[in-house]
Amino acid sequence: MKLKIIFLLFVSFLNFSCSNTKSFHNQKIKKLTEVESLKKYGESISLAEALKIGEERNLTLKIKTLQREVATLDKNISFGNFLPSINLVGNYSQLDNDINIDFDVSELTTSLGNAFSAIGESAIASQTTMSSTLIEKSSYTYGVNAQIPIFVPSYWYLYSAKKNGEDMSKLVESLSKKLIELQITSQYFYILTLQSQEIYLKNEIKSIEETTKRSKISLEVESIMPWEYKKALVLLKTKKYNLKENKRNLKIAKMNLLKSLDLNPIDNITLESYNFKQKPFPDLEECILNSLTNNEALKISNLNVDVSQNAKKIAISNFLPKIILGGGYVNNSNKILSDPSFLNVNVSGVISLFNGFKNINEYKKAVKKEKIANLNLEKEFMKTIIETANAYYNLKKIDELLAISKLNLNAEKEKLKQSKAELSVGIIGEDKYFNSLASYNQSLTAVKNLEFNYNLSLSSLNITMGKSPIDKGE
């Protein structure tokens, strides 16, 4: 009986331990996936909604925004160099004894002895020193001091460089926002493409299943060879595998989109269809002109040149004197002073005569960096022209392919209509009809894919020209 009780207690302990372990793992998983759910935005989202969510929640954009705010604070800090610096100072000291100072009064004593020889001559003659308190045992000092730079040229150029840095961070934030929009748009269209391919694959599988059934009948009557039937089975299994792979890719694509939106990646997401509008685009010369005027990367390189020029000016200013105006109010408890409080004003200056050639080498370094910045600007200038031309011609190519694919889709649509009529009167079998249906869906998928690529190419061209990649109102 006792063994039975011990056994039951042991089993209960194991169940309790397993329950706690399971609960711990569930809490851990919940913590790892504790990201805001998609349900807040609805079960389905449009491209415009996805872009808006990404703008609000994308982690990369949040980082760029904080970096821009840091750059603004750096600029404000450098501006503080132009303002007066005011400090409240205080000090309290406690010594083990008063600090005294002795004065030699022997000559004074001799003079007094000769003048007053009748009164205490011997006592005065023996007193050759006199003591006085210099610093008391306990003392305090307090006051206010202030200083302001009168002539410090490096502060001017440092502020200008920090202002350039703020402008650069704004451009980086703007460019990052556009690139995130392009990424979200690409992921959105990729999901829609996979969904379109899924429809096409399902119809193609139906057609192949019908063909496989007919092949099996033909094999039974020995009108085809066994290897021909096996080939039909391989084709069917291959298409079914393609469908499964399509579904896996679709799941991963949705997770990547949710990651870009900083939403729970294990949520299911339904995307709304996108109404394609083929818009005209300007000629190449106008696109290049817009890129050279508005491209963010080119503007950043231009600001880098300004920063390097300011760095060179700072290096030159190190050879110039620095003049600072100061002053303040001081009050102390030292009784040796007849007036314990006083005001003071001072002007101080410093100029570097020799510091191990540091200033000279700093100037040489700044000149080299300015040359590097100018070369990078020239490099970015050529790169912008080439990227604009590439984006333009890629868009032109897709535009032409889209026109051909639409023509083919119209032909497949008429072919499917004819196959449907022939099936209804028994001229063709279901295998031929499903084959026509699969061919139509394949053409439709090709058109959709080209439409999505057209939008992506147009978005890339817009980014190169410094424009918003896509119209969020669409």
Image: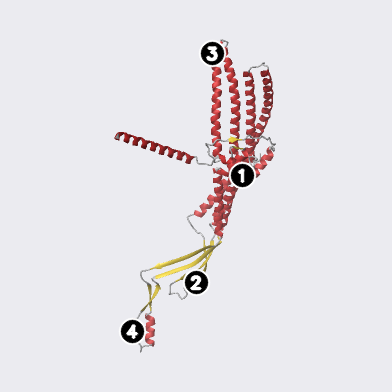
> Residue at position x 36%, y 36% from top?
12
Of circles 4 and 1, the one toward us is 1
Quarter where residue 388 is shown: top right
Quick check: marks 1 and 2 in contact, CB under 8 Å? Answer: no
Label 4 to label 2, Cα distance in Å?
40 Å
For label 1, the SS is: helix
Identify the colour scheme used. Answer: secondary structure
Disc 4 target residue:
123
- Sequence-earlier tag: 3 or 2: 3
For label 2, the SS is: strand
| Amino acid found under the numbered disc labelled 1 | Glu
Quarter where residue 393 is shown: top right
Q: Quadrant of the N terminus?
A: top left
Label 1 to label 3, Cα distance in Å?
65 Å
Up the image or down, 113 lies above or below 14; here it is below
Label 3 to label 4, Cα distance in Å?
145 Å
Label 3 to label 2, Cα distance in Å?
115 Å
Pick the front one: 463 or 244? 244
348 vs 110, left or right, is right
Disc 1 target residue:
296
Up the image or down, 89 lies above or below 301; here it is below
- Sequence-earlier tag: 1 or 3: 3
Residue 6: numbered disc: none
Disc 2 target residue:
342
Label 1 to label 2, Cα distance in Å?
58 Å
Disc 3 target residue:
226
- Sequence-earlier tag: 4 or 2: 4
Q: Looking at this rendering, what residue extends furthest in the front direction?
A: 1
Q: Is any atom of residue 301 visible in this view? A: no
